[in-house]
Image (tube, rainbow, N blue to C red):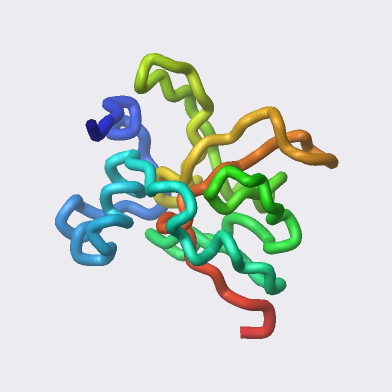
Amino acid sequence: MLFKRDQAAEETFPVTKTEAEWRAALSPEAFRVLRQHGTERPGTSPLNAEKRPGTFACAGCGAALFDAAAKYESGTGWPSFFAPIEGAVATRTDRSFFMTRTEVHCAACGGHLGHVFPDGPAPTGQRFCMNGVSLAFTPAGD
């Protein structure tokens, strides 16, 4: 079942596109996750194994979200980070699927990235568990 939030439709972001523009710019899976708050299957993203220095950006709008130095192996099957780039992401309460979680979205376009949990490593103690299809990786120096 796909969950759509009414709250997200009420928010405004610096990067805006119509639904048709988003569909044209994204793969069907990226559209489902970024724009319809879907979740990719764990262990399916090639970004799980990405260990090079660089930057993880929003696959929707290209805004830089996470420095590769903040990435770690959480064992969850999704790319995980202990901290985002300052101001790059925002959160909202997600009460879908009979639970309460903290959803993480791109502060620039509002694209759904994943969720944050309070069980991550030092120094923040947070685990930003992101959908790989929501991210694009650029190696340092490129």
- Picture quadrant where residue 7 is located: top left
Q: Is residue 55 above or below residue 10?
A: below
Asked whether, in this view, residue 89 is left or right of residue 31, the answer is right
Q: Residue furthest left?
A: 20
Q: Is residue 46 above or below residue 85?
A: below
**Residue 4 location (% of width, % of height):** 26, 31
Q: Is residue 15 above or below residue 118?
A: below
Residue at 49% from the left image edge and 66% from the top image edge = 46
Asked whether, in this view, residue 5 is left or right of residue 142, the answer is left
Residue at 23% from the left image edge and 58% from the top image edge = 28
- Picture quadrant where residue 98 is located: top left
14 or 61: nearer the viewer: 61
Residue at 68% from the left image edge and 84% from the top image edge = 141
**Residue 41 location (% of width, % of height):** 39, 47
Q: Residue furthest right?
A: 123
**Residue 79 location (% of width, % of height):** 57, 53
66 or 12: nearer the viewer: 66
The quadrant of the rendering that contains the C terminus is bottom right
Q: Residue furthest bottom?
A: 142
Q: Residue furthest top?
A: 98
**Residue 116 location (% of width, % of height):** 59, 35
Residue at 31% from the left image edge and 30% from the top image edge = 10
Asked whether, in this view, residue 74 is left or right of residue 100, the answer is right
45 or 19: nearer the viewer: 45
